Image (cartoon, rainbow, N blue to C red):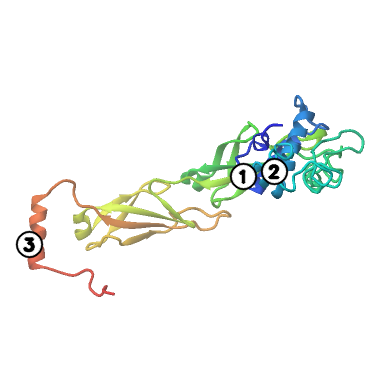
């Protein structure tokens, strides 16, 4: 018997939930009543035996400590409670680990595994239900550029099943919206309906705009003379550049609101706004004239922009 962690494709740090999830996936794939995989019966038994060890907290701990092997048998040297005699786990009265095995055929099933696990997988018949079953759903997330959030359109999605589809993106969808694609999941056994694909739409990061609900924020650099004298400057938006007015004597950090230039809302509601924060950018390189002017200002026209900020 191989290492049960390797059988289930797990790391030794796997959580109980990850162990159960891996078992469910592999058991469904290799169940002899419905699998067409080669050596399905042997693989199913191996998977079940691995889960017999790892799905039980005490047995998993004993295996991790080296007290039992991959079949649940005590390792030498013998420890108290792991003897092979009549009172030990392998004897008639033992309360320890049982050898794991499967039986197939009428009325048979996998022994020593919680029947609820098989009820989840195959119905109440512990793996023997022959009714058509729906295939598993699959899930995938895809990022959408902010410009396409504003305009809608199609986005290419690659599903875990190997299919590639063009999915229609609604205008103004909310970040995290899930779209269900009927019948695009995993195929079903015995002629059942295929599962669905759940596609979660996410906003792609933008190099200029920061999303705040339906509003967008933009930091726009302006020159020192534009801040002092005022100016008309171009500012980017999702729908193209627009001209905005920088008032004279504008301090760095002042915000201008461009109404309706944010993200649209579904249902033809009013779009959000674009909040443009102005940042004064000094000219590149050393400017001796500017430096001299600032020294004169420091001597002749001093002022304290931090007045009243003391703790």
Tell me the distance, in whole angstroms, between the alpha carbons under discs 2 and 1. 10 Å
- Using the image as rendered, state which of residue 190 and residue 49 is in the foreground: 49
Mark 3 near mark 1, Cβ–Cβ under 8 Å? no
**Residue 41 falls left or right of residue 243:** right
Residue 214 in the image: above or below residue 65? below
Q: Percent from the top left, x then y, of residue 53?
A: 72, 42
Residues packed near mark 1 inside 10 Å, few (<14), some (14 to 19) or many (20 plus): few
Residues packed near mark 2 inside 10 Å, few (<14), some (14 to 19) or many (20 plus): many
Mark 2 near mark 1, Cβ–Cβ under 8 Å? yes
Q: Percent from the top left, x then y, of residue 140?
A: 60, 41
Residue at which label 2 appears: 54
Residue at which label 1 appears: 14
| Res. 154 image quadrant | top right
Return the disc, 2 or 1, that comes first in the chain's sequence.
Answer: 1
**In the picture, which quadrant includes the N terminus?**
top right
| Res. 291 image quadrant | bottom left
**Residue 199 falls left or right of residue 111:** left
Q: Which mark is residue 296?
A: 3
Which residue occupies 83% across, 41% down? 111
Residues packed near mark 3 inside 10 Å, few (<14), some (14 to 19) or many (20 plus): few
Tell me the distance, in whole angstroms, between the alpha carbons under discs 3 and 1. 68 Å
Residue furthest top in the image: 38
């Amino acid at each position: 018997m191989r290492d049960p962690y390797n059988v289930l494709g797990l790391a030794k740090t796997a959580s109980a939930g990850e162990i159960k999830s891996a078992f469910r996936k592999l058991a469904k794939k290799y169940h002899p009543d419905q699998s067409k995989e080669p050596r399905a019966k042997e693989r199913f038994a191996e998977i079940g035996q691995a889960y017999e060890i790892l799905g039980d907290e005490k047995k998993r701990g004993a295996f991790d400590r080296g007290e039992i092997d991959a079949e649940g048998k005590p390792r030498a040297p013998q420890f108290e409670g792991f003897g092979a005699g009549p009172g030990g786990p392998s004897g008639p009265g033992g309360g320890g680990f049982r050898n794991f095995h499967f039986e197939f055929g009428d009325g048979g099933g996998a022994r020593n595994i919680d029947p609820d696990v098989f009820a989840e997988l195959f119905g109440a018949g512990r793996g023997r239900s022959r009714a058509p079953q729906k295939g598993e759903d699959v899930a995938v997330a895809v990022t959408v550029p902010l410009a396409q959030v504003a305009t809608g359109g199609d986005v290419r999605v690659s599903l875990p099943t190997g299919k590639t589809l063009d999915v229609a993106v609604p205008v103004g969808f909310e970040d995290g919206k899930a779209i269900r694609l009927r019948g695009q999941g995993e195929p079903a056994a015995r002629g059942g309906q295929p599962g669905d694909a759940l596609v979660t739409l996410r906003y792609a990061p933008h190099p200029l705009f920061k999303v705040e609900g339906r509003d967008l924020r933009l930091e726009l650099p302006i020159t020192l003379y534009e801040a002092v004298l005022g100016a008309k400057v171009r500012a980017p938006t999702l729908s193209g550049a627009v001209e905005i007015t920088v008032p004279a004597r504008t301090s760095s950090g002042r915000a201008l609101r461009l109404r309706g230039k944010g993200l649209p809302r579904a249902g033809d509601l009013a779009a959000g706004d674009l909040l443009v924060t102005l940042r004064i950018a000094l000219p590149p390189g050393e400017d001796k004239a500017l430096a001299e002017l600032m020294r004169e200002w420091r001597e002749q026209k001093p002022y304290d922009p931090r007045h009243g900020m003391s703790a």
